Image: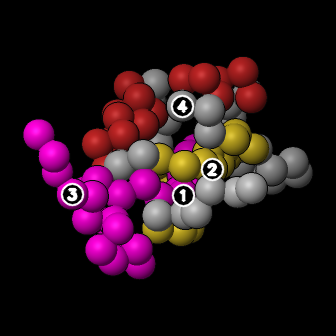
Amino acid sequence: MNQRNSCLDSPQRLSLDCPAMYRITIQGRLGREWSDWFDGMVLTSPAGLRESTTSLTGLVRDQAALHGLLNTLYGLGLPLLDLTCLEINPTPEK
């Protein structure tokens, strides 16, 4: 089965099968050791904030993978505060 990747047709338009860079902000703190649970995303928790939050930033291969990440956060009881698509179909760094 040879399906065409719609990301190649329009790199600035998000579709279900496009990779994209996301920043997901949750209520609560997760240490960096949780990175493997979230497909290697970078976890950061700002210091000095009164409320504890964690941001997960990284490449998500498609919308199904994004759904999986959000489902994992839900399963851990971590409320979603923000979800931002930073870049659609990012080019690999050299």
Mark toward the start of the polypeptide (3 vs 4): 3
Q: Earlier in the sequence, mark 1 or mark 3?
A: 3
Q: Which badge, 2 or 4, is on the more N-terminal residue?
A: 4
| Pointer 1 with pointer 2, Cβ within 8 A | yes
Question: Could you tell which of marks 3 and 2 lies nearer the N-terminus?
Answer: 3
Q: Which residue is mark 3?
A: 4
Amino acid at dot 2: Thr
What secondary structure is marked by label 3?
loop
Between tags 1 and 2, which lies in front?
A: 1
Mark 2 is surrounded, within 10 Å at the Cα level, by few (under 14), some (14 to 19) or many (20 or more) other residues, namely many
Give the residue at x 16% y 46%: 2
83 vs 76, nearest the viewer: 83
**Element on which disc 4 rests:** helix
Q: CA distance from mark 1 to mark 2?
A: 7 Å
Magenta residues?
A: 1-27
Q: Amino acid at mark 4?
A: Phe
Residue 47 as seen in the image, left or right of residue 26:
right
Residue density around tag 3, few if under 14, some if 14–19, many if 20 or more, within 10 Å: few
Residue for point 62% across, 39% down: 41
Which mark is drawn over residue 38?
4
Find residue 31 and report its image quarter. top right
